[in-house]
Amino acid sequence: MATSVNIRRDVKDPFYRYKMPRLQSKVEGKGNGIKTVLPNIVDVAKALSRPPTYPTKYFGNELGAQTKVEGKDEKFIVNGAHDSERLQSLLDGFIERFVLCGSCKNPETDLIIKDQIIIRKCGACGSNSDVDMRHRLATYIIKNPPPKAKKAGKHAAASNNDDAAEDDVGALTHGTASLAVSDEDDDDDDWHCDEEVLRSIGNPGPLAQQAGSDDADADADGDDANSDGVDPFDVLGDFIGEGQHDDEAVFAKAKELDLHTNHRALVVVIQCVFEGSTTLVKDIAKHKKLLTRFGNSEKHQRAIIGGFERLIAANPDALLSKTPATLMALFDKEIVEEEVFLEWGKKPSKKYVEKDDAKRIHKAAQSFLEWLENAEEESDDEDDE
Ligand SMILES: [Zn+2]
């Protein structure tokens, strides 16, 4: 097998000058803990002049799987088992959308962020082409801009690649949990919604930084790990990921991070606490107190459903069929109310998962939703009497 492939795999010319290493992947672990390590993603990304977090995160988006960086040796990981060929095909999509020039299809482009729009600036033909901002990765890129963009002029070109690798690792370490969280915002193509979410996710104190982070300048404005401060959602996710803290400690940590009333923190909590679980019903009962401590608003309850949607989307083989039972457990334990379920049930929303996953989950939830509606009618009848 060739160790390098054309960046544009549709170009069969062996003398095509733009090459990248063939993407490698290695499945590790078993059962629910199964994951795919990307041993050479740093090199692949370097060949594309993109941070390794971008393609990694892209895989996660496309596969509905969580991604993270793990351990001292910074392994890039996509949860679940995915073969190299599939990932290589997804990589083609990433390259098409986020690397190749929109006009001449040359891969020598830089990503530039201007007014919340990502532009591929082509070094070959000079044209600027917009990236499709509706793709989830676009949100992530805005939040974690390419290192060059924020260091423009400070470093010699020769060191750019190394900087990129370093920065990215930081960004992904920093992004572990909010890789997940920052996904949640592309509700119905409303970009303003995205901006709002970005602000609220990137800032430790919702009040403290709102004014400062409002500007939409091309430069990173403190939203990233490498300038001022760490994303509290990530800190929380990492804390839970250490696997040795009970719910009390998790909530205390959330409080310390000023996330203890934040509904989005629930999405992180759910994804991290329930990660790998196939006994959601039982585990929901076990963690009931934690799930209800963050708040009881509709937003909080909706975020709880969202967290479980994410879990199901990440492990559909084991969990999709258990959707009704899972939702029933949330209802039964008085974690999510009837009204919130019924509102959620109106139509699949890509607020927390990919549209296709949302549809699948909704379909799987039908029996529960129907039961709930009937139950409501019955109780309404009783009220009338
Ligand atoms: Zn071009």
Image (tube, rainbow, N blue to C red):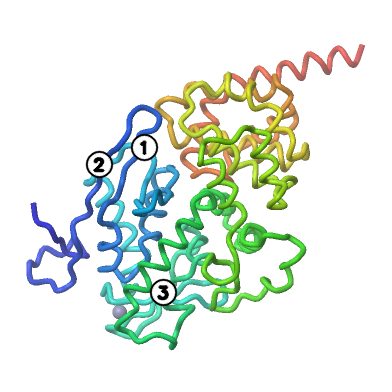
Report the residue marked by disc 1.
80
Vertical position of residue 88 compared to residue 336: above or below: below
CA–CA distance between discs 2 and 3?
Answer: 28 Å
Helix, strand or loop at mark 3: strand
Q: Quadrant of residue 120?
A: bottom left
**Where is residue 75 drawn, in percent x and y?**
34, 51
Give the side of residue 27 with respect to residue 65, left or right. left
The numbered disc on residue 375 is none
Report the residue marked by disc 3.
111
Vertical position of residue 221 compared to residue 237: above or below: below
Helix, strand or loop at mark 2: loop
Looking at the picture, which amino acid does disc 3 mark? Leu
**Residue drawn 77% across and 18% down?**
377
The numbered disc on residue 83 is 2
Vertical position of residue 125 compared to residue 317: above or below: below
Quick one: label 1, few (<14), some, or many (20+) residues within 10 Å? many
Is residue 289 or residue 212 the one in the foreground? 289
Q: Are marks 2 and 1 in contact (CB under 8 Å)?
A: no
**Where is residue 276 drawn, in percent x and y?**
46, 31
| Residue mark closest to the camera, 3 vs 1 | 1
